[in-house]
């Protein structure tokens, strides 16, 4: 049959006849020169007694030959059917596994390479016939046939099922075989049933469906039994595949509903009648497959459960699976899944479907909740993950329904995961679908309501960040996803409520609340105000209003009140009525009026919002209708009275924030009509005083607006009624809150001065810090803000300042001590709030009123009165401008009283706080004298001999302490005394030169005596100042250096004017210079600058032996110049102290440049290369005023060359450009550093104010200029040089 020949390079010629003499057409050559006789091959494999080795070899040779294209083409074209029968006979007659496998492979190879469907159909038909007949019984031969048919049906051929002739017999025989215990047979049968069950889709022949349906109960039961008992993964996989198809067809669902196996008794045995229901068997069968180590089996089983539960949506199926603990298996698979997508997807889908059985599922979900957390981490990180939504639903359901299963760590973990999700969405890293966003918000709300979340600072932080991110997302994506807005608003509202739980610490609570208020204030409110016209869904507008209402409703802490004020400041009332016009529904009306009521509660007090809530149902939609209702007669209608009260409240609140709900003329007309129609005795009895105040406020505002530009006529009768009500009822104008324009108009009405004075007294009593006076205040603590009253006083176009002065006089004359304390306290506070108010008070005679208290017995008998009076006087003198002080005689009398009281108190009680504040007052009196005010009062201070002796004594004692002076600072009582006296001396030096120039003897200030020597006016000698500068504490050094600088400056001016010369001993001068030089490098640049300026002034006194001075201090002078140059050219090389203090040193170097004839070495230090190096290192932002001063003096001294002048000029032009563009700020040298804290207490405040004023005055007097001014001076000098 088989022969071999030599291999030819070309196709061999037709082979000769085989050894059996068969014709050549059945003798097929192979490419290697051999040949195969098909008849011989057929005879060999068809003969039962043929040796198996021969059969196996023949099958292998044919298989090899069929892999050769030429042989395959020849065989398929002419002999494709020839071997079908022999091969099937062999397959049905052999019991050898290898030969059976070879035969099956050969059959499949023929089928796959043959395009003729008839060949395929013939093979399928013969194999199926053999199986249908049952001729092979259930032997190995039957198994081979099952395997072969299964492979044939799995081939990529169309409609293989039509070739099966007896479908019912085949199915019945397969069902019979399924009862066998052989897992191998079960696996093959299940695969065949799986393939046959697909026939409904692949064939128009419905006989298969009928055949399967007829045997369906048996198929289902036997399949499930096999699945339940088998340990074979193949059986499980094929069984699950079959069940999936049956589930897709609805057969599984229908059979479980019927569950007729017991009645049919199809197995024919009594035991089967008592079997469990099919759904129980199904659940039990799933367990083994779910525990399979083969992931393919697991995934297929999970998919089967999904199909089963998805069909029909019957919760009873879920209930059965839950009772059989399938959910526990699912959670275990999830736990071991390692977050692999196929497993996670199916498991989460099953759990989501099982959740339909809510009560039973809750218990399982509670147990498996911890397993879901890693899944949540995984699905949240992947955008649009297929089970992201279902996973979040499960998490939400467990937190909501099983709070006991959720621990604090779980809550914090979930919060952190969702926070990251929203953060990524905000920055655009991922996109979050609307449903996922909604679930995120819902989960956060559920977390907040969970008991274990109480007090969790970590969750609070997550909520804080997430609520902000959620709101930003919804506002950004509103056009695409409007629904997100409601979800985020719900989260924000609940978060604010969560922040008020008592389990939080104060800081955590406050931080979360402030965060919510911030995002509403900065994001939600501006968006709503600007985008309301684009909102089409009323629910969104209602959601915003609901959120704001929830915030306003929670509490009345300062932050919420501030948010409320910001809300109403954005024209909220008119905006709200605009919303009502867009959505004219009852729901919107109720929400808007309830927000109004909460605003009233927060701004006015907890009782007033109830007026709006009571009238909300009857309130109109339009603000014009509000005015119509207001103008009606309400005598016979309590309902109308309620509405009018609420309308007055709305108009009053809106007027406070300049939010006009209607035209002013219309509002004024309605208001007058209301007054004229409703005023009677019953009005006074029935209405509360507060409503009268609202009415007065609105009336005054309308009148003030009419006066400004509206030219609205008014009813004198209505005005009379208003004033009469004010007189009779005494309404609290200043304690109820009132618009400044309304208040100003009222205080411009001379007809009600008495009533206004009473109002001012009442205001003083209510707002005073005087604890001895008890006032009946309303339950709420809403009082008019003091700055409004201060503005009223400062404006000067009303009677308020005059009435306050009258009130002060009145309480003094009537010996009303408590009222005096209240009025003085308010006057002081008003001046502190608005210093210009002092000018109006002074112009209206407050000095004369204060004078009366100094001569009243109350002053001498009460320390408290003396202290508050001194505080008022000091505050007044500090704030008032000198040209506004008109009552000089009164002030002179006051000063005499103050000086006498000061000297007497020091003699009897020593230096106490009262005396030190009086010294501060005297200092301010002297300060005003330099501006031609309080001249006589200042002379009283300067020439008072007991005061002079007292001051000299204290200064002498202080100077005699030597190095111990360092301990006298602002923290010690002796230090406070010395500071106060030095400040008085500073202002004395300035005042005596201004008002008593004839008594000055500057030479006396340089006399040095070992013992205390008295002067005829308040002053201090230079050597005492030098001691204080040298030994004193930092604050003493500062004040003393200012005093010395002021003396030296005035001496220089005096020398120039009078052409006089000073006679100072050389030793004395050298000692002064030595002290000043030692402080040029002092750490306080203000002290060092003062000392440097003093040295520069000394160097300018030509009559002194300056040559000797310079020669004595030559090394020090050279050091200063070299360090200054180094700090300009190379700051990194200069000494650390000099880098900070190069500004004071400039003044010394400028003075030395003016003495260049005496300093021969100066040109060697400031040579051309040095100056060029400084210019090269400079940049425009490094130019300072001191540097320009230095170069100006170099220019005047002739040290600058033309190219250097040009380079520096370009640098100044660039600097000027930078200043104009804002890159460099042109600042004058203002030292804001304060050694004494101004706000600590009264005495420190006094010292701090005086020192601040001293520094400002010294800066002004020493001609300290800004950078731009110095640049202009340099340019001017350059032009003069040219």
Image (cartoon, rainbow, N blue to C red):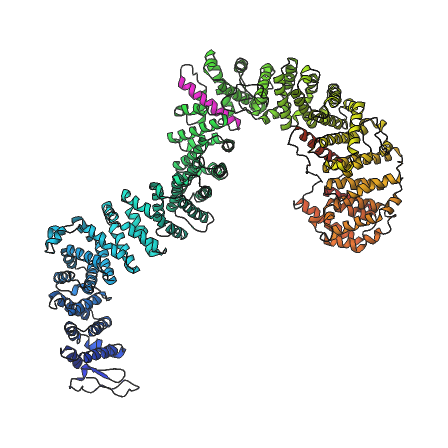
The answer to whether 1164 is drawn above or below residue 1108 in the figure is: below
**Depth order, front residue of 257/26:** 257
Tell which residue pokes out farthest to the top in this image.
681
Numbered circles on residues, count: 0
Q: Quadrant of residue 489?
A: top left
The answer to whether 300 is drawn above or below residue 477 in the figure is: below
Q: Is 829 colored magenta in this rendering?
A: no
Q: Position of residue 88 (x, y in %)?
A: 16, 72
Q: Quadrant of residue 1258?
A: top right
Specify whether 533 is left or right of 708.
left
| Residue 1101 can be seen, yes or no | no
Q: Position of residue 420 (x, y in %)?
A: 44, 48
Q: Position of residue 843 (x, y in %)?
A: 69, 21
Name the main secondary structure of what is drawn in magenta: helix
Q: Position of residue 299 (x, y in %)?
A: 29, 57
Position of the N terminus by quadrant: bottom left
Q: Quadrant of residue 734?
A: top right
**Depth order, front residue of 557/574:** 557
Specify the segment rendered in magenta.
Answer: 635-658
The answer to whether 826 is drawn above or below residue 141 in the figure is: above
**Depth order, front residue of 345/85:** 345
Specify whether 584 is left or right of 731.
left
| Residue 153 can be seen, yes or no | yes
Specify whether 856 is left or right of 476.
right
């Amino acid at each position: 049959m088989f022969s071999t020949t030599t291999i030819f390079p070309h196709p061999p010629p037709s082979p000769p006849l085989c050894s059996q003499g068969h014709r050549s057409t059945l003798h097929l050559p192979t490419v290697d020169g051999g040949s195969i006789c098909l008849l011989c091959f057929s005879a060999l494999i068809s003969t039962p007694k043929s040796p198996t080795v021969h059969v196996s070899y023949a099958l292998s040779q044919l298989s090899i030959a069929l892999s050769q294209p030429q042989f395959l083409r020849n065989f398929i074209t002419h002999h494709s059917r020839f071997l079908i029968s022999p091969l099937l006979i062999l397959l049905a007659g052999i019991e050898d596994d290898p030969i059976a496998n070879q035969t099956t492979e050969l059959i499949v190879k023929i089928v796959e390479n043959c395009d003729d469907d008839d060949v395929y159909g013939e093979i399928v038909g013969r194999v199926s016939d053999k199986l249908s007949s049952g001729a092979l019984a259930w032997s190995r031969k039957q198994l081979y046939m099952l395997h072969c048919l299964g492979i044939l049906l799995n081939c990529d051929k169309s409609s293989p099922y039509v070739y099966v002739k007896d479908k019912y017999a085949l199915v019945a025989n397969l069902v019979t075989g399924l009862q066998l215990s052989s897992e191998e047979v079960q696996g093959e049968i299940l695969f065949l049933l799986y393939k046959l069950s697909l026939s409904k889709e692949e064939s128009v022949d419905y006989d298969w469906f009928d055949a399967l349906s007829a045997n369906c109960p048996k198929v289902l039961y036997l399949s499930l039994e096999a699945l339940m008992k088998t340990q074979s993964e193949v059986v499980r996989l094929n069984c699950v595949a079959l069940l999936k198809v049956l589930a897709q067809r609805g057969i599984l669902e229908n059979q479980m509903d019927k569950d007729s196996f017991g009645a049919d008794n199809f197995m024919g045995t009594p035991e089967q009648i008592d079997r469990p229901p099919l759904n129980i068997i199904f659940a039990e069968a799933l367990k083994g497959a779910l525990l399979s180590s083969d992931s393919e089996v697991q995934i297929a089983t999970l998919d089967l459960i999904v199909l089963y539960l998805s069909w029909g949506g019957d919760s009873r199926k879920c209930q059965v699976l839950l009772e059989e603990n399938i959910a526990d298996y699912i959670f275990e698979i999830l736990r071991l899944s390692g977050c692999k997508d196929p497993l996670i997807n199916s498991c989460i889908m099953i759990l989501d479907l099982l959740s339909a059985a809510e009560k039973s599922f809750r218990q399982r979900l509670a147990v498996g909740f911890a397993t879901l957390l890693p899944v949540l981490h995984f699905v949240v990180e992947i955008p649009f993950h297929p089970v992201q939504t279902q996973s979040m639903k499960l998490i939400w359901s467990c937190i909501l329904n099983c709070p006991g299963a959720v621990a604090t760590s779980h809550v914090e973990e979930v919060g952190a995961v969702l926070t990251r999700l929203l953060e990524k969405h905000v920055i655009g890293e991922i996109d979050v679908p609307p449903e996922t966003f909604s679930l995120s918000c819902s989960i956060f709300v559920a977390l907040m309501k969970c008991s274990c979340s109480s007090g969790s600072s970590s969750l609070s932080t997550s909520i804080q960040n997430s609520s902000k991110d959620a709101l930003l997302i919804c506002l950004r994506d509103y056009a695409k996803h409007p629904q997100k807005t409601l979800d985020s608003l719900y989260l924000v509202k609940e978060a604010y409520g969560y922040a008020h739980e008592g389990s939080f610490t104060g800081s955590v609570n406050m931080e979360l609340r402030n965060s919510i208020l911030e995002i509403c204030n900065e994001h939600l409110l501006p968006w709503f105000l600007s985008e309301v016209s684009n909102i089409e869904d009323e629910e969104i507008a209602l959601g915003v209003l609901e959120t704001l209402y929830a915030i306003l409703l929670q509490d009345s802490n300062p932050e919420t009140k501030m948010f409320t004020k910001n809300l109403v400041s954005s024209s909220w009332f008119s905006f709200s009525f605009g919303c009502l016009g867009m959505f004219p529904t009852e729901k919107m009306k109720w929400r808007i009026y309830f927000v109004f009521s909460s605003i009233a509660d927060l701004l006015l007090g907890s009782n007033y919002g109830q007026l709006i809530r009571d009238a909300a149902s009857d309130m109109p939609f339009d603000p014009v209708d509000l005015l119509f209702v207001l103008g009606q007669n309400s005598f016979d209608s309590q309902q109308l009275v309620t509405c009018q009260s609420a309308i007055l409240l709305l108009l009053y609140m809106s007027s406070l924030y300049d939010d006009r709900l209607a035209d002013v003329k219309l509002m004024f007309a309605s208001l007058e009509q209301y007054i004229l129609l409703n005023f009677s005795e019953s009005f006074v009895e029935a209405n509360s005083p507060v409503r009268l105040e609202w009415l007065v406020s609105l009336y005054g505002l309308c009148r003030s607006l009419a006066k400004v530009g509206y030219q609205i006529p008014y009813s004198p009768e209505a005005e009379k009624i208003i004033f009469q009500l004010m007189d009779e009822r005494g309404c609290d104008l200043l304690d109820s809150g009132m618009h400044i324009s309304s208040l100003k108009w009222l205080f411009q009405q001379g007809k009600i001065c008495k009533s206004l004075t009473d109002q001012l007294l009442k205001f003083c009593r209510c707002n005073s810090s005087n604890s001895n006076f008890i006032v009946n205040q309303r339950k709420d603590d809403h009082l008019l803000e003091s700055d409004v009253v201060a503005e009223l006083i400062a404006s000067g176009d009303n009677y308020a300042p005059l009435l306050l002065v009258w009130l002060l006089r009145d309480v003094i004359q009537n010996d009303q001590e408590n009222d005096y304390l209240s009025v003085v306290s308010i006057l002081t506070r008003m001046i502190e709030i608005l210093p210009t108010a002092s000018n109006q008070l002074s112009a209206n005679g407050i000095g004369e009123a204060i004078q009366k208290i100094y001569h009243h017995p109350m002053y001498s008998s009460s320390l408290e009165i003396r202290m508050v009076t001194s505080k008022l006087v000091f505050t007044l003198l500090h704030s008032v401008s000198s040209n506004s002080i008109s009552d000089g005689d009164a002030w002179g009398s006051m000063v005499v009283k103050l000086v006498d009281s000061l000297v007497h108190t020091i003699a009897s009680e020593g230096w106490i706080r009262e005396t030190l504040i009086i010294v501060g007052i005297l200092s301010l009196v002297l300060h005003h004298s330099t501006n031609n005010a309080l001249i006589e009062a200042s002379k009283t201070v300067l020439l008072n001999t007991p005061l002079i002796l007292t001051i000299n004594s204290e200064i002498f004692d202080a100077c005699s302490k030597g190095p111990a002076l360092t301990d006298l600072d602002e923290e010690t009582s002796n230090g406070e005394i010395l500071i106060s006296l030095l400040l008085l001396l500073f202002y004395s030096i300035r005042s005596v030169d201004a008002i008593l120039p004839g008594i000055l003897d500057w030479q006396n200030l340089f006399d040095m005596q070992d013992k205390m020597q008295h002067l005829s006016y308040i002053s201090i000698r230079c050597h005492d100042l030098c001691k204080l500068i040298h030994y004193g504490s930092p604050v003493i050094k500062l004040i003393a250096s200012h005093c010395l600088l002021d003396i030296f400056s005035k001496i220089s001016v005096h020398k120039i004017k009078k052409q006089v010369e000073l006679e100072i001993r050389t030793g004395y001068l050298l000692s002064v210079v030595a002290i000043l030089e030692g402080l040029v490098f002092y750490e306080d640049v203000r002290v060092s600058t003062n000392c440097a300026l003093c040295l520069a002034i000394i160097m300018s006194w030509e009559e002194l032996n300056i040559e000797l001075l310079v020669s004595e201090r030559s090394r020090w002078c050279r050091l200063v110049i070299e360090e200054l140059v180094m700090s300009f050219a190379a700051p990194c090389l200069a000494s650390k102290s000099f880098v900070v203090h190069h500004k004071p040193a400039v003044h010394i170097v400028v003075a030395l440049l003016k003495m260049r004839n005496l300093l021969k070495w100066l040109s060697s230090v400031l040579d051309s290369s040095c100056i060029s190096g400084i210019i090269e290192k400079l940049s425009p932002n490094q130019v300072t005023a001191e540097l320009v001063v230095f170069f100006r003096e170099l220019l005047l001294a002739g040290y600058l060359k033309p190219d250097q002048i040009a380079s520096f000029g370009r640098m100044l032009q660039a600097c000027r450009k930078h200043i104009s563009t804002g890159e460099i700020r042109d600042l004058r040298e203002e030292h804001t550093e304060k050694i004494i804290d101004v706000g600590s207490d009264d005495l420190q405040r006094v010292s701090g104010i005086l020192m601040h004023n001293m520094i400002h005055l010294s800066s002004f007097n020493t001609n300290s200029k800004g950078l731009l001014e110095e640049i202009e001076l340099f340019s001017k000098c350059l032009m003069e040089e040219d």
